[in-house]
Image (spheres, helix red, strand yellow):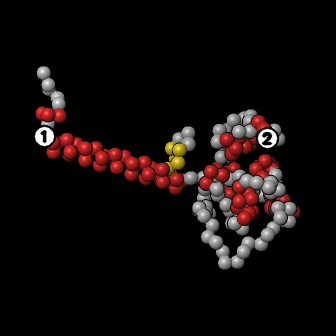
Amino acid sequence: MKIFSIDNKPKYLLLASFIIGMIMMAGVYEFGIWFSNNYRLQPVIVPRDISPVNEEYQWESIPSTTPAPKVSPRTNLKGKTAIVTSSKYPDFIDHIWLRESGRGTATAGLNVSCAKKGLSNEMGFYPSGKHCFADFETSVKRLERWYEDNSALTDNQKLCRYNSGTASNSCAYLTLSFKDMN
């Protein structure tokens, strides 16, 4: 006994089912694109408009008509050190500056790619977005704000969260053992 077979269904019903299925798949695909453009996945889903990256974020640097001056990482080191030491949280910021870019002396990484664009990010801030700040002082101010936004945590928890996203009391980021860091 054949209850369900292609022979029992009119051909236009099969074609209509196929077209409706394709429309539904296109809708799911479009929703996926919309979701990835508006949200970022973390342990919790967070809308992009409340992302940790503030309004200074630049997706791509617009090329300038004048070339950026070639500055070696050590040229402005004293000025940067003064900015860090005069910040609200100098120990916290210096810890991050040392571990993320060797206080601006690292020869590879986000700090170098930003410097090539005439921008700055020696703090390793939002590396997955290749975020660059207009200047070093702006990055220090952003870290001060990040510190205050996470005021409920201890300093060690803040440092671990800054590096790994997880607030814990102990992590490899608290030491100089870089090989232990993921």
Label number found at residue 10? 1
- Quarter of the picture holding the C terminus: top right
Q: Is residue 85 left or right of residue 4?
A: right
Mark 1, secondary structure of its residue: loop
Label number found at residue 138? none
Depicted 138 relative to depicted 98: above or below = below
In percent of the image, x 37 and y 46: which residue is there? 28
Q: Is residue 27 left or right of residue 49?
A: left
Residue 67 versus residue 96: which sits nearer the camera?
67
In percent of the image, x 61 and y 54: which residue is there? 129
What is the quadrant of residue 111 in the picture?
bottom right
Q: Amino acid at mark 2?
A: Phe
Q: Is residue 15 left or right of residue 142?
A: left
Residue 138 seen in the current view: no
In percent of the image, x 74 and y 39: which residue is there? 181
x and y percentages locating residue 84 in the rendered image: 80, 58
Residue 115 seen in the current view: yes
Query: Which of marks 1 and 2 precedes in the sequence?
Result: 1
x and y percentages locating residue 143 in the rendered image: 70, 54
Q: Residues within 10 Å of mark 2 (few under 14, many from 20)?
A: few
Q: Mark 2 against mark 1, which lies toward the viewer?
A: 1
Q: Amino acid at mark 1?
A: Pro
Disc 2 marks which residue? 178
Q: Residues within 10 Å of mark 1 (few under 14, many from 20)?
A: few
x and y percentages locating residue 144 in the rendered image: 71, 55
- Quarter of the picture holding the N terminus: top left
In percent of the image, x 39 and y 51: which residue is there? 30
Residue at the top extreme? 1
Alpha carbon distance from label 2 to label 1: 68 Å
